């Protein structure tokens, strides 16, 4: 399995910081013209561990970029009706340019119905069927942040993906499906794998570009990777803490130590896709604000 080489580590943290710098400059211009800051509202229902990691850095980075951050933390028992009512209030609030409802939602809430309630012009996650359909048809719209951030890392690493074999593991509305659409739009040959896929390891081994968005710590092993491949690890998994520690380590969906001896380039967790997601979210919020003001 080991080829004796070591992969280039794709520095999502640094690339994201550069994007946030550009967004901050533009956000200052927006505030001067509009007489108010662009505003982002984040809704978290319950306490999904990956969502907790997300909100942790998001509030601070939103303010650093010169935008307003509105946070709504709701109990896990919140009813679907109450959540829908909050979404409608945010739709009607002129200070709010972007609305992000964190997924997954507790099981008693239909996430499809909640996403459908978000004003597509404020849907900075790009999940509303109108924006998802626009992405599928190659029309302009708000694009999901994690897939957009992943594509930017892929393009910076491999350049043109036209004709390359891309395998996406995971088919969620949030990550797997939109990243597959973007790779397809960039002319890669795309296969989307999921929990019913047969011989996942053999399928992954054919990928020049492998995107893992599963939510299973270190599931993708080193010997699943084609030598020289580019590996994008979307997974954010919090391991159980060591006996004397408050928080467990964060790991991706790829066994990083193994994979880096086979791949030519790989994203780390943390420091890979996560920071890019936030940078793209801020960029989408500014884009939504600019369109709304006209
Ligand atoms: N870095 C970032 O910015 C972000 C990270 N994440 C992280 O990415 C991961 C994926 O998130 P998300 O897409 O929302 O997760 P979901 O749980 O919505 O989707 C997971 C997907 O993985 C598939 N899957 C599950 N088990 C297996 C298996 N054993 N073999 C093959 N496929 C499997 C599922 O298949 P099926 O459809 O058949 O059930 C499903 O399509 C999570 O760790 C999440 O925390 C998410 C968003 C942003
Ligand atoms: N509607 C919706 N959209 C999402 O985009 C979404 C979501 N729901 N639910 C939860 C997941 C998870 N997610 C993360 C984004 C960034 C980091 C991030 O910045 N991570 C840092 C780690 C920071 C630290 O160590 O605390 C890193 O990877 O370097 C993590 C997780 C977005 N998600």
Image (tube, grey):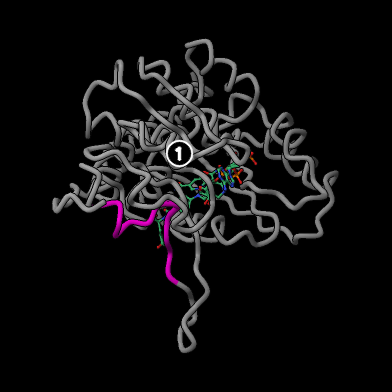
Pick the residue in front: 71 or 149: 149
Tag 1 residue = 146
Query: Residue 15 at x, y = what percent?
Result: 25, 43
Q: Quadrant of residue 122?
A: top right
**Residue at 72% of width from left, 58% of height from top?**
74
Pick the residue in front: 120 or 293: 120
Instruction: From this view, report whether residue 163 is shown above or below residue 232.
Output: above
Asked if the stretch drawn in magenta spans residue 223, the answer is: no
Q: Residue furthest left?
A: 5
Q: Is mark 1 within 8 Å of ligand 1?
A: yes
Query: Residue 32 at x, y = what percent?
Result: 37, 34
Pick the residue in front: 204 or 60: 204
Disc 1 crowd, CA 10 A, few/some/many (<14, 14-19, 20+)? many
Indicate left or right for 273 with 86 as reference.
left
Q: Which residues are magenta?
A: 249-260
**Residue at 64% of width from left, 53% of height from top?**
44
Asked if the stretch drawn in magenta spans residue 259, the answer is: yes
Q: Residue furthest bottom?
A: 244
Pick the residue in front: 250 or 78: 250
Query: Residue 187 at x, y = what percent?
Result: 36, 14
Indicate left or right for 201 with 72 as reference.
left
Query: Residue 88 at x, y = what percent?
Result: 75, 36
Quarter, ligand 1: top right
Callout 1: SS: helix
Instruction: From this view, report whether residue 226 is shown above or below residue 255.
Output: above
């Amino acid at each position: 399995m080991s080829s004796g080489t070591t992969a280039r580590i794709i520095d999502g943290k640094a690339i994201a910081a550069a994007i946030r710098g550009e967004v901050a400059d533009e956000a200052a211009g927006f505030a001067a013209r509009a007489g108010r800051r662009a505003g982002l509202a984040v809704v978290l229902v319950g306490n999904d561990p990956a969502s907790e990691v997300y909100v942790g850095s998001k509030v601070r980075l939103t303010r650093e970029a010169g935008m307003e951050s509105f946070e709504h933390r709701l109990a896990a028992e919140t009813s679907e009706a109450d959540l829908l009512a909050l979404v409608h209030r945010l739709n009607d609030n002129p200070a709010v340019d972007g609305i992000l409802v964190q997924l997954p939602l507790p099981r008693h809430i239909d996430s499809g119905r909640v996403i459908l309630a978000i004003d597509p012009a404020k849907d900075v996650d790009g999940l509303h069927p109108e924006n998802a359909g626009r992405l599928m048809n190659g029309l302009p719209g708000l694009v999901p942040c994690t897939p957009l951030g992943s594509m930017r890392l892929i393009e910076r690493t491999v350049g043109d993906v036209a004709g390359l074999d891309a395998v996406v593991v995971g088919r969620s509305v949030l990550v797997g499906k939109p990243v597959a659409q973007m790779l397809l739009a960039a002319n890669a040959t795309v296969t989307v794998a999921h929990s019913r896929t047969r011989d996942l390891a053999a399928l992954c081994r054919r990928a020049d570009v492998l995107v893992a968005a599963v939510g299973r710590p270190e599931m993708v092993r080193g010997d699943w990777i084609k030598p020289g491949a580019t590996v994008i690890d979307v997974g954010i998994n919090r391991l159980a803490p060591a006996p004397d520690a408050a928080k467990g380590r964060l790991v991706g969906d790829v066994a990083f130590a193994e994979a880096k001896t086979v791949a030519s380039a790989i994203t780390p967790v943390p420091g890979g896709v996560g920071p890019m997601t936030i940078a793209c979210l801020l960029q989408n919020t500014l884009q939504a604000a600019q369109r709304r003001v006209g």
